Amino acid sequence: MSIPALDAAAMTAARARQDTLTKPPGALGRLEDLSVWLAGVQGQCPPTPFRRRRLVLFAGDHGVAAHGVSAYPAEVTGQMIGNFLAGGAACTVLARQADVGVRVLDIAVDSDHLPPSVTVHKVRRGSGAIHLEPALTGGELAKALAVGAAIADEEIDAGADLLIAGDMGIANTTVAAAVVAALTDSPASAVVGHGTGIDEDGVRRKQAVVSAALERWRPMGIDPTVVLRELGGADLAAMVGFMVRAAGRRTAIVLDGVFPVTAALVAEALAPGTSAYVVAGHGSTEPAQGLALERLGLAPLLDLGLRLGEGTGALLALPLLDAAIAILAEMATFGDAGVAGPVDA
Amino acid sequence: MSIPALDAAAMTAARARQDTLTKPPGALGRLEDLSVWLAGVQGQCPPTPFRRRRLVLFAGDHGVAAHGVSAYPAEVTGQMIGNFLAGGAACTVLARQADVGVRVLDIAVDSDHLPPSVTVHKVRRGSGAIHLEPALTGGELAKALAVGAAIADEEIDAGADLLIAGDMGIANTTVAAAVVAALTDSPASAVVGHGTGIDEDGVRRKQAVVSAALERWRPMGIDPTVVLRELGGADLAAMVGFMVRAAGRRTAIVLDGVFPVTAALVAEALAPGTSAYVVAGHGSTEPAQGLALERLGLAPLLDLGLRLGEGTGALLALPLLDAAIAILAEMATFGDAGVAGPVDA
């Protein structure tokens, strides 16, 4: 899919308007940059407030969870889906606060007991243990990418103008670390972190799994679809398809932690230009996220020490986007307000 | 005024509840700390959502503005008051977004032409040029401190449960730098920054003014009321009185940039314990803010490169406080949700 460029004229107009508002030039820092970016995404200056924001949760299990890389058992993935649907999870609480609708999808949970409403797009039960076998078959990869694109289409057709891809899956930071290592040519030691709370022994096991996975994959080469198939998973691939389609349809995407940022890195490799529609919501304690963001040229808006996933860091960043739009749309200019400019102006 | 301690029992209960919620312990990072702090401020777990949030703008001019320390002429202070009242300033736009009521006060604007509604608490026209003369007389200092306390009382009596002290005053970062230098025993070179946008020559002039002010003050000693009288200003002193009274009445205060953080530093020196009721909203590019925050043991929630004042950085941080309260009040526990805990638990 070819990705349209941001609207340069709208961005120029937004930058010019920022410099007429009743504040010193640049004094609103990253809010000004956000307002210019949103003008470029929407193709209008000022951009309009978001009408329909959506969090899509991509749940999936990973075979590596059985190999001591996570502090939690794999059953938690399926159990948390019940918690999402009941509204008791962190992401659902924060989504209510931020006026974001939530959609929960079982892409590859290792369970047959989830409600049909969430399993409608299921690709398989758990992705393969990447240090031992491919995460996906070629057919499953294609299906997962198509599912993600179809979900983006459904959401945008229903009016969504801001999207967050949230992740839920025990051991998914291991998979993200392996994919980032492959795409940035980094060793396991540079990408593996403590996830949701493993100890130093756990980190060593996680590094060994990632190293073995990279060794298994390396002869197959750096084609991003190969990396996704061998080292990723159905949930990650669906998220990639979702982001590529959202960008192709000029829709803003807010990233969360290491898993969605990894999806964005793959999406950019598959469909260059995708990352122009992406903003980084929150910095992660996982080192793979930092490497991926650096490669994408993105800096997170927030750094609050979150390490949960579920889109939580992206949800917390949304008020900053709203603020950026309001500033550009509602502030008075020096001329309107009868306020003097700088001494030398 | 003696400042009550935070409620330790409510904080213990909040910390214990965080560890039962459906997320790994600590996975919500600073949101968890905020929820515990808010429980301590309110004396209940979970804390309740804020009902009445208020931004009080303390406007004042400073004699140093005539000495080449700012990019803007002093008339801007009074002109911006009109912009605040009309709702076209950054702070008023962001306050609407964050559901915060705004009150504008002329504490020491160098103008006689402002509306009576804002001049009711005026202490004087412009504070003294601190490198040449005291900022205030002893009587003016006492009046400014009392005015700030009275305003806090009025706001809290009217139901305010969250307060922001915003600043507006050309050259006020010079004054803040001098006060922070005095209270942290730092040289002018360690506290002076570019303010709203001066060049390197401007920074040198600002350093010279701060150095001269410190030299004039030094023989008088480090008593915080002496520092306020000699190096501060009526707007700063009113803000100090406001914060001390708010803390004395157990009300949460969100700080913005260098000027309110300087006020908090003075307030803590005058009434130890005040800073327990304070959270830092936004990091400033002014080095004096970093020194003051370090002394207060505070780390800002946001760092978006803002350098405007007016309470803007504090307003942007408010959704994080709302989120912290919602998490503690609304998330399900592992027991409620039937979700398994960590493998070793």
Image (cartoon, coloured by chain):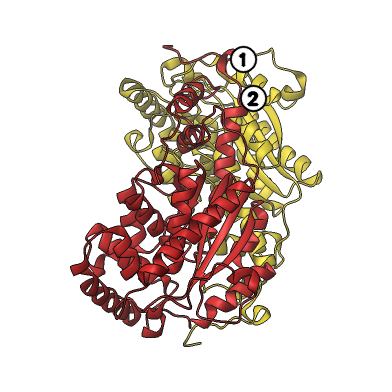
Chain colours: A yellow, B red
- Front one among B283 and A150: B283
Secondary structure of the residue carrying numbered label 1: helix
Count of marks, rendered view: 2
Q: Which residue sits at x=61%, y=40%?
A: A240
The residue beneath circle 1 is B336
Give the quarter of the image for residue A127.
Answer: top right
Q: Residue furthest front?
A: B139
Secondary structure, mark 2, is loop
Note whether B341 is above or below B43 in the view shown.
Answer: above
Observer able to see residue A242: yes
Q: Is residue A3 visible?
A: no
Asked whether, in this view, residue B28 is left or right of residue A247, the answer is left
Mark 1–mark 2 distance (CA, rounded to whole Å): 9 Å
- Please state which amino acid type lies under the numbered disc 2: Gly
Query: Is B3 rendered above or below residue B133?
Result: above
Q: Amino acid at mark 1?
A: Asp
Residue on which the image places disc 2: A88
Front-lying residue, B111 or A299: B111
Q: Position of residue A203 (x, y in %)?
A: 35, 25
Task: Report the residue at 30% width, 58% height from top.
Answer: B224
Q: Is residue A289 above or below residue A195?
A: below
Going 36% across and 68% down the picture, which residue do you hit?
A: B138
Closest to the observer: B240 or B307? B240
**Residue A6 in the image: above or below residue A22:** above
The percent position of residue A133, horizontal first and vertical second, equals 49, 22
Q: Are marks 1 and 2 in contact (CB under 8 Å)?
A: yes
- Give the quadrant of residue B86: bottom right
Horizontal arrangement in the rendering, residue B2 relative to residue A56 (left or right): left
Where residue A233 appears, as percent x and y from the top left, is 56, 29
